[in-house]
Amino acid sequence: MLTDHYELTMISAALHDGTADRQCVFEVFARRLPPGRRYGVVAGTARLLDHLRNFRFDSDEIDFLARQRIVNTETASWLESFKFQGDISGYQEGELFFPNSPILTVSGSFAECVVLETLALSVLNHDSAVAAAAARMVTAAKGRPLIEMGSRRTHEESAVAAARAAYLAGFASTSNLAAGLRYGIPTAGTAAHAFTLLHDDEQAAFASQVLTLGHETTLLVDTYDITQGIRNAIEVAGPHLRAIRIDSGDLSVLAAQSRALLDELGAPDVKIIVSGDMDEYSIAALRAEPVDAYGAGTAVVTGSGAPTAGLVYKLVEVQGRPVVKRSENKRTVGGRKTAVRRHKPTGTAIEEVVVSQGTPAHQPNDRLLQRRFVAGGEQLPDVPTLQQSRDHLRDCLISIPWEGLKLSVGDPAIPVIQE
Amino acid sequence: MLTDHYELTMISAALHDGTADRQCVFEVFARRLPPGRRYGVVAGTARLLDHLRNFRFDSDEIDFLARQRIVNTETASWLESFKFQGDISGYQEGELFFPNSPILTVSGSFAECVVLETLALSVLNHDSAVAAAAARMVTAAKGRPLIEMGSRRTHEESAVAAARAAYLAGFASTSNLAAGLRYGIPTAGTAAHAFTLLHDDEQAAFASQVLTLGHETTLLVDTYDITQGIRNAIEVAGPHLRAIRIDSGDLSVLAAQSRALLDELGAPDVKIIVSGDMDEYSIAALRAEPVDAYGAGTAVVTGSGAPTAGLVYKLVEVQGRPVVKRSENKRTVGGRKTAVRRHKPTGTAIEEVVVSQGTPAHQPNDRLLQRRFVAGGEQLPDVPTLQQSRDHLRDCLISIPWEGLKLSVGDPAIPVIQE
């Protein structure tokens, strides 16, 4: 039922007039990247394939649809036996995309393809938006680990998907336990200000935390006074404490002061973790400071200004005939696309070539961007794992021209040539 | 498991040191509204209460937590028997809020309250962000109906909650079928461009849609040429067609042209629905045009620039003693708060008065803002229905000073006085 009313009314009309079985090709692509962004990151494909296995309409749902007169009897019986039997191919998760990159291709009968539109877009738009923001933060952090801790700033289920997308993009860990359980992502976290406030004083809170969690823990030192908090932390935990966390104030000043104080207290190995409304810009701004790890929340789970990836799901081919919508300000190219990315012999990407109803002329250092995920309704075995997708994105980000990694507003890192 | 790692490590330490049972009060509030916003809208409370009934840790989850050494044996056994047994009160859904309004108060033992932090904030931050954006759109539409059609732009489960929040805020209907089934929200929708492209020509598509769905349907007229599309629509469906939809182009120009053409074709009762990246500003900009209804998508489900409501969950009282975090740039007032809204005899709201550990001196036209939702872990029977919350918000928006409804950047509609 994670779909739109109009998908079913379209199916009703198409079943009635006999067009529901016409063989169609739908493609997912972005007309443009969010303002100023230089690349998009494909994320969510594996989650979509998981959903697809359970995408059915049960009898309660069909009763509801019939009672509300959203579907007629013919459509109700079609929904009852619905199982997607078409093909799906696309860019793998962790692949970069640019305007008009055909990141997912769904083919089959009109009815079985159109009913997937809303779900496919929901999953890909959300996860890709988070992954793109997260990838920019990973670049900004220059190798320092990032912890995703934004669950509380987004819908409770988005939070789990966001943790996955951030990990795919190179985050080291997440605070979200459901993401740990479902996807095997490392989880992290120690204590909030409430834990300190619960106790009679800060020393008591720190002592309790170290007693239960050991020295490999992070003490939050900014509940009262940061300088005193650091002194208390080292007094209680000694120089083998893993880290302190600062969650407020001018982090660039505080990080330097805290490092100096920790060194002075004979605790040069105690790490400094900073958090509190971090985005790619504030992460980059702390590059010169003695920060060992970042916690990012709101900005990563909400796509850092671009909460949706702008992906659309468009019919491009009907029974082998390219179709195209022509109206004000929008133009799509008809026909099923094949996409390759061209590279210099050094491995640097030059451009993406997208050909309608054909295949790009082969050149050395071309890489085919599409893989088959589903054939005849059955998922193929070689869908990349989350870890493989994470590695793939890291490699892709190395392959684009260096300007493509700049945080500033700019054009897409490479052009997409439509042939 | 929709919670954060650190909630459980805090509980471990607190169980070990004996503080886990200390009676605590936590409050949910926003330090500030999103930039320029004049009010917030409470949404999600009923969803949170639904979650609370099922908020348990099953044996697979506890095994995972133990295996990952996130919890020790003592905590594992606490989680096994966990059931919230405290009290919850708060502002009802549809209530307005301002900086420092105590919109939710959770009291009980430290452990049972802190474990709800992430879930409570996820639900309230998401739903309140959508509801606030949606309320601004409803104001901008000046009584013309709004259809929520943003499911595809947000996570598949956020989409359902967003449809609910938009309906609470006054939207007329949603495209999301799961929201129709779960919450009884009216659903709407007819056809996409794909349906037209599927057919041999536009007339065939329109004829099929009218044949199956009847004249009470909306024909999408901008797949090829809008003028011809409207001519085709009236030729096929006649003057008793319910509506046409335009999804692209300069909507102010096209609405006026389309109205003139429909009138010329003898179809003055055919309504005009516009959609395509509508937000509160573009909705307001069409006020002078002959638009009968709006479809809003991306902007409503992503909070129109403010995708999270900025709500935090803070410990304010431990065993009757107010507690407060004092560090750089953040200041909370300790103690359990009681809040009233003061009004002029005419009913116009003047201010909100929030008193710590006491009750505001009663004045005529005061309204107590907090209700009891849960007592001793049991949900009380009088949680408002979605329809009641929707009506309540409509009344609240009438009660604030008229400047509070302006779309432009401004201060909160009324001040919050902390005593």
Image: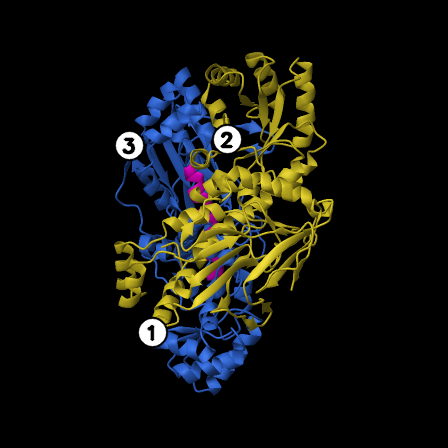
Chain colours: A yellow, B blue
Question: What residue is shown at x 49% (from left), y 30% (from top)?
Answer: A187
Q: Residue type at mark 1?
A: Thr
- Label pair 3/2, CB-CB below 8 angstroms: no
Query: Label 1: which residue?
Result: B212
Describe the element under mark 1 as helix, strand or loop.
helix
| Amino acid bearing label 2 | Pro
Is residue A45 something one can see in this rendering?
yes
Kindly identify which chain the residue marked by label 3 belongs to.
B
From which residue to which does the magenta span run? B119-138
**Which quadrant holds the N terminus of chain B?**
top left
Give the side of residue B47 with respect to residue A99, left or right: left
Judging by the rendered image, the residue that carries numbered circle 2 is A186
For disc 3, the neighbor class at 10 Å (few under 14, some 14 to 19, many from 20) is few
Query: Few, some or many C-alpha atoms within 10 Å of disc 1 (few <14, some 14-19, many ≥20)?
Result: some
> Same chain, marks 2 and 1?
no
The earlier-in-sequence mark between 1 and 3 is: 1
